[in-house]
Amino acid sequence: MGLDEVVNYCKSTVNEMDMLGVGSDVYTHDMAHCLQEGVIALAAGFGKLRTTPELAADDANIARKAERRVEKLYRRALGELFQGEDYLNMFKRREIYRHLSNAADRMAHCANTLHDIVVKSC
């Protein structure tokens, strides 16, 4: 269910970017890349539970680190975004950045769940 929420946030981000007429920038690209790395790690980790659950903890850590990178990018993006006077663009982009940040939060929750499973199974 948690991974589904990550996917839904990503879909709604793309839909809102289209609806708001907001293109990709360096921050959205980098945040999306971090999300991709984290989700790939989670898929690998959940896939290891049956055969080598002890190795899945490493994948959970990769996903958590990816979430932290998204949060750092989010804060940096906001700091840069709220310069100047183009308020309409500021609020549109902030909405997009927030969706990506929320997706990363859900990804971290999935990583914590994976780690909990590893701890209980090993």
Image: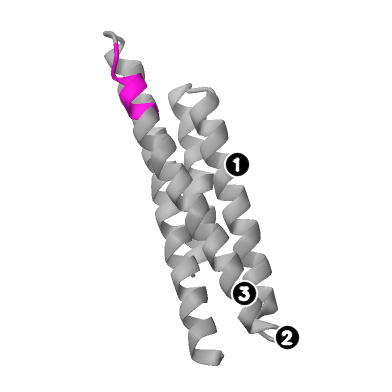
Label 1 – label 2 distance at C-alpha: 28 Å
Discs 1/3, front: 3
Residue 89 lies left or right of residue 27; in this view the side is left
- Secondary structure under tag 1 reads helix
Q: In which quadrant of the rendered view does residue 99 lie? A: top left
- Of 11 and 60, the residue lying toward us: 60
Disc 3 target residue: 56
Residue occupying the point 69% across, 78% down: 48
Q: How far is mark 1 from mark 3, CA to CA?
A: 21 Å
The reply to whether residue 24 is in sight is no
Residue receiving disc 2: 51
Q: With 55 as the anchor, is 14 left or right in this view?
A: left
- Percent x, y of residue 37: 62, 51
Task: Give above or below for 8 relative to 86.
Answer: below
Residue 91 seen in the figure: yes
Name the kind of residue labelled 3 in the image: Ala
Instruction: Assign the C terminus to one quadrant of the image.
Output: bottom right
Q: Give the range drawn in magenta.
A: 77-83
Q: Residue at x 36, y 25 (%)?
A: 92
Pointer 3 or 2: first along the chain:
2
The image's colour scheme reads one colour
Residue 33, numbered circle: 1
